[in-house]
Image: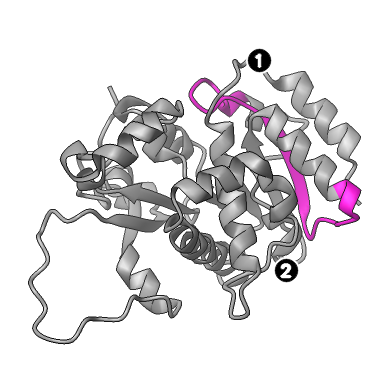
Amino acid sequence: MLDVENAVAFTQSCEASIPDSRLDETANWVAAARAEESKRVYRLFDDPLANLLAGEAGFSWLAKYPHSANSLAIRTRFFDDFLVEATLSHGIRQVVILASGFDMRSWRIEWPEGVRLFELDRKELLEKKCSTAEASGALPLCRPTFIGADLTVDWKNLLLDESVGFDPATPSAWLIEGLLVYLDDWQVGSLIDDVTMLSAAGSRIGIDLASRAILDPRRNFTGLKELRVRGCPWLFGTDEPNRLLEERGWDTTVCEFEEAEQRYGRRRPMSYGRASPEPKDKPNSFFVTAAKLPESEFPKSAYKNG
């Protein structure tokens, strides 16, 4: 059984003073989307605690961006499958979720025996998640460790603390879901550099990225303005989603959002008649997965964040 009191005490003891962040509300937003998906008959996953975690703030965000319910559900299922494959097919037993928010994978995924899951996010979010799970009687299906951390500063030492039990010499599965779009270019590069440094050969990573067109105010002025007003501006986008990891020594696979829609039976029906060609710079999002290569196979000129 998860000792919530000790978990919360641990996050308090190793977290520096971090100012309140409006990004916390995006965790409510994603929880609301997962709650809506869990109501569906043919749902992609079941997250019974999402409704409790979403709160009024989460459903307010979802009402503002109703189409996000489907896209966030697809993203959740995609990375569920990624983590299950990493642990079942590749035998990885260390899983690290950065900016885990109200992600309940510790409780809802049937993990292989021996999996340790390390979650890093703001202390307040982790505390609420743990207390909600405890109050509901839910038990984790792995060995979770919760670490309060600001991922824009030096979080590595918290994960590497001997009392935590993370071993950088052992392959890990990393998930960075729903975070990178809120960081600037330097912060994104620095975060991926840190993860790469902590990843043994054979490690896996999953990230989601937005195209530059999504961040173009000429295409999405109202939505981007609303995010700025709410204190959560979207900052990072790329039209080369493979480069971020490939240049750091990862063997990368990119799945465009429409491909994931088709995979999970959520593709919007095509209209009859001749379809017009889609512009090359259309707004898009990407789900990127990769495996860490041995040093002998690193690209000759690896990218260095400067």
59, above or below 224, in the image: below
**Can residue 97 be seen here?**
no
Q: Nearer the viewer, residue 259 or 119?
A: 259
- The residue most toward the bottom is 272
Q: Decide which of tag 1 and tag 2 comes sooner along the chain.
A: 1
Identify residue for label 2. Answer: 110
Which residue is located at x 31 percent, y 61 percent? 254
- The C terminus - image quarter: top left
User: Measured from the top left, where is residue 175 in percent x and y?
Assistant: 52, 49
Question: Residue 244 magenta-drawn?
Answer: no
Q: Quadrant of residue 112?
A: bottom right
Identify residue for label 1. Answer: 16
Q: Nearer the viewer, residue 73 or 242?
A: 73
195, above or below 239, in the image: above
Residue 116's disc is none
Which amino acid type is marked by label 1? Ala
266, above or below 23, in the image: below
Which residue is located at x 17 percent, y 56 percent? 282
Figure coloring: one colour
Q: Secondary structure at mark 2?
A: loop
User: Measured from the top left, where is residue 235 in percent x and y?
Assistant: 32, 32
The range drawn in magenta is 134-157
Q: Secondary structure at mark 1?
A: loop
User: Measured from the top left, where is residue 280 in percent x and y?
Assistant: 10, 59
- The residue most toward the top is 17
Q: Quadrant of residue 163?
A: top right
For disc 2, the neighbor class at 10 Å (few under 14, some 14 to 19, many from 20) is: few
Left or right, residue 197 beside residue 252: right
Left or right, residue 116 beside residue 187: right
Which residue is located at x 41 percent, y 77 percent? 263
User: Measured from the top left, where is residue 97 in percent x and y?
Assistant: 59, 45
